[in-house]
């Protein structure tokens, strides 16, 4: 039976090798903090607060990208059909659609090709006019370029380790006698057998007339503006 949709399905395959182990590349696709550093074509930035992803079959995959040039927003609203860590992801848009009626189905395969290198293959099936196909291909290609850059930056930070804290400043030296300060007399020790004199206990502070004394654990009332 012939397809009767306005935009027939068109397929793209984009391959990129990145200098990172497969587990880290997987995290870059499923961890919102890492995903926000690269998702989208160059000139678009995924907003971290907009990313909702659950790495499980049927889990959501939603985010909003914003144009760096003029603030134009582009939303992605899909779901994950297959999740096989750290080997394969299948993304469908809109959520839960089949291949026959989905706008996009993207199958992403991660293959370890060296101890610290991974091949990423994106096979995407899109329903869009043929004139838009080159833009979709360049968009995916530039997004994978951003992925490679984000992974390189992440690994550089890990290699550098946590930032070294500044050494605590040494306390200023105590002034010596003769520099405008008289030395404190040494405390007198009681003679052998003599009891230490007791200091009188301070009288408990009485509440002002009409004021209720605070109960244990009660917080003081906040200051009133302008008071």
Image: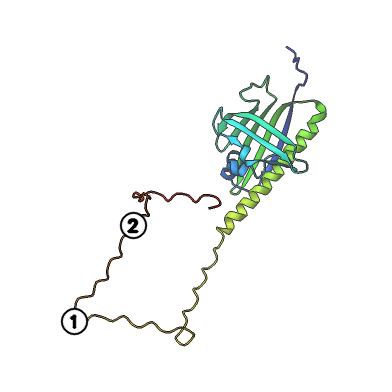
Residue 154: horizontal and vertical position, in percent? 61, 51
* Lower sequence index among marks 2 and 1: 1
Residue furthest toward the top? 1
Residue 86 vertical position relative to residue 102 in the rendered view, above or below: below
Residue 184: horizontal and vertical position, in percent? 38, 82
Q: Is residue 219 left or right of residue 79?
A: left
Residue 34 vertical position relative to residue 97 in the rendered view, above or below: below
Q: Nearer the viewer, residue 104 or 212?
A: 212
- Residue 54: quarter of image: top right
Q: Nearer the viewer, residue 203 or 133?
A: 203
- Residue 8: quarter of image: top right
Determine crowd level at label 2: few under 14, some 14-19, many 20+ residues with C-alpha closer than 10 A.
few
Residue 25: horizontal and vertical position, in percent? 60, 43
- The residue where tag 1 is placed is 192
Disc sitting over residue 147 in the figure: none
Location of the N terminus (image quadrant): top right
Structural distance between the alpha carbons of marks 2 and 1: 40 Å
Residue at disc 1, secondary structure: loop
- Residue 166: quarter of image: bottom right
Disc sitting over residue 206 in the figure: 2
Residue at disc 2, secondary structure: loop
């Amino acid at each position: 039976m012939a397809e009767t949709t306005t935009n027939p399905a068109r397929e793209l395959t984009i391959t990129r090798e990145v200098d990172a182990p497969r587990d880290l590349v997987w995290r870059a696709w499923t961890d919102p903090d890492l995903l926000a550093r690269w998702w989208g074509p160059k000139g678009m930035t995924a907003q971290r607060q907009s990313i909702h992803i659950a790495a499980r079959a049927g889990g959501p995959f939603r985010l909003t990208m914003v144009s760096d040039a003029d603030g134009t927003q582009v939303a992605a609203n899909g779901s994950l059909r297959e999740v096989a860590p750290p080997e394969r992801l299948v993304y469908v848009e809109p959520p839960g659609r089949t291949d026959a009626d989905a706008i996009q189905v993207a199958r992403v395969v991660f293959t370890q090709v060296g101890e610290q290198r991974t091949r990423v293959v994106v096979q995407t099936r899109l329903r869009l006019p043929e004139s838009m196909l080159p833009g979709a291909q360049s968009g995916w290609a530039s997004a994978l370029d951003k992925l490679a850059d984000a992974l390189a930056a992440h690994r550089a930070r890990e290699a550098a380790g946590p930032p070294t804290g500044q050494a605590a400043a040494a306390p200023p030296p105590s002034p010596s006698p003769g520099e405008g300060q008289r030395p404190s007399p040494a405390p007198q020790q009681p003679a052998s057998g003599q009891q230490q004199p007791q200091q009188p206990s301070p009288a408990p502070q009485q509440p002002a007339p009409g004021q209720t004394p605070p109960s244990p654990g009660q917080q003081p009332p906040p200051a009133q503006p302008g008071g």
